Image (cartoon, coloured by chain):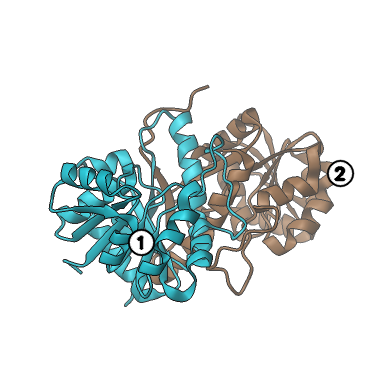
Chain colours: A brown, B cyan
């Protein structure tokens, strides 16, 4: 898996930048995309590790795996922008359907999940996977160990496995979560974790799966 | 909270029996309900700790807090049965919208969650809370320590707090998860955990919330 070309669309945001940095640090070839090539280059230079910066479309063209890290409100436009450049690739949607100001309330989209919405928008031209819904970007941006698992969803098992490996490369633990439709569980859980952060004054509450006895069957 | 009268409707099932036993062992006054009073009495006698057995309606009448532990397919009929006897009480719905044979796929009901469905069915006559979605009944039935949290959802905070205390009495950790609508997250996560159990050959994978720094604010 090392030296795969990874594009992080919306990579100037907190989550995208943190994922980019950890993947590049682990040896992956990472390109950050943004609506503005200039701000992408500027963030890429700050992050170091050889990360490149360009527009979202250019980044999507450059990547073998395209990770999309934009807010829910920008998901539709961003996917439309990268669609022609993502054909035949694995697209990892990280969108959580948060609808400000009620971000502590679960509000899943009509499709059942943001991942299913992404799948509807990009169609069968890409292999859709979703992940990184419950990670506190602030913790991921630092070098600290994170006690939290990343559930990975997708209907295509090889693609899902590739993304589990990518997650592992960031220092988190990737866990197969099943079909793309199951993404609803992790997406909804984000609102619950935001609520928990408020009520328990926690900093970046996370999710851990207990009781895993073995590696997944091949 | 001790010595509250707790009714467990559908208490002859695996989850209901396990919750009943742990609550009774902790000093609560527990009544198990079933469609058949006879089987309720028989399971109650097996469980011990002074647990009583009767019909679901009788149990609902006897309880201050009514915990409903039935499969999704039986939710509607069971709630209709206990409705006249649950008025003014806290009802704890534990229903997970599993639709056999596809129990590893998230399939939330039209209302958004089984808890919202329960709320629609029972209306404002009861104070609805939901919990216990991600617990492996087999582990709960034994006396072993369980490394897993129980998220508790509800729009009424005092009722939610009462149920968090009940969960704590079972030896698990109750965690406030926010509004009743947020129940979708834990309900959906059950299908993910069933998938994980299969893929990772785990026995009763569970969910743990990491990063809780303090007790919830009062």
Q: Nearer the viewer, mark 1 or mark 2?
A: 1
Q: Which residue is at a point 18% across and 61% down the rendered structure image?
A: B29
Q: The numbered mark 2 sits on a residue in which chain?
A: A
Q: Nearer the viewer, residue B218 or B99?
A: B99
Using the image, tell me which numbered label, if any, was put on residue A79: none
- The outermost residue toward the bottom is B218
The answer for how far apart the CA atoms under marks 1 and 2 are is: 44 Å
Picture quarter containing residue B1? bottom left
Q: Position of residue B63 (x, y in %)?
A: 27, 65
Q: Position of residue B129 (x, y in %)?
A: 41, 65
Local secondary structure at mark 1: strand
Q: Quadrant of the N terminus of chain A?
A: top right
Q: Is residue B98 left or right of residue A38?
A: left
- The outermost residue toward the top is A218
Q: Which residue is mark 1?
A: B175
Using the image, tell me which numbered label, if any, was put on residue A84: 2
Residue B87 visible to an observer of this rendering: yes
Q: Nearer the viewer, residue B130 or A66?
A: B130
Q: Which residue is at a point 78% across and 51% down the rendered structure image?
A: A79
Q: Which residue is at a point 30% across and 38% down the rendered structure image?
A: B138
Q: Position of residue B206 (x, y in %)?
A: 38, 44
Q: Is residue A51 left or right of residue B57?
A: right
């Amino acid at each position: 898996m090392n030296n795969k070309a990874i594009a992080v669309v919306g990579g100037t945001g907190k989550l995208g930048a943190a994922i980019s940095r950890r993947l590049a640090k682990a040896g992956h070839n990472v390109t950050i995309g943004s609506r503005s090539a200039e701000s992408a280059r500027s963030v890429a230079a700050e992050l170091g590790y050889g990360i490149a910066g360009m527009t979202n479309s250019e980044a999507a063209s450059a990547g073998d795996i395209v990770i999309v890290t934009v807010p829910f409100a920008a998901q539709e436009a961003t996917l439309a922008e990268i669609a022609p450049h993502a054909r035949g690739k694995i697209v990892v949607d990280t969108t959580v359907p948060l609808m400000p100001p009620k971000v502590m309330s679960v509000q899943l989209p009509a499709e059942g999940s943001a991942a299913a919405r992404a799948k509807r928008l990009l169609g069968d031209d890409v292999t859709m996977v979703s992940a990184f819904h419950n990670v506190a970007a602030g913790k991921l941006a630092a070098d600290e160990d994170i006690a939290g698992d990343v559930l990975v969803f997708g209907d295509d098992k090889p693609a899902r496995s590739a993304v589990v490996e990518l997650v592992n490369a960031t220092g988190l633990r990737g866990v197969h979560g099943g079909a793309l439709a199951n993404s609803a569980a992790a997406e909804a859980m984000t609102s619950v974790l935001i609520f928990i952060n408020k009520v328990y004054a926690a900093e970046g509450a996370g999710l851990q799966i207990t009781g895993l006895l073995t590696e997944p069957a091949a």
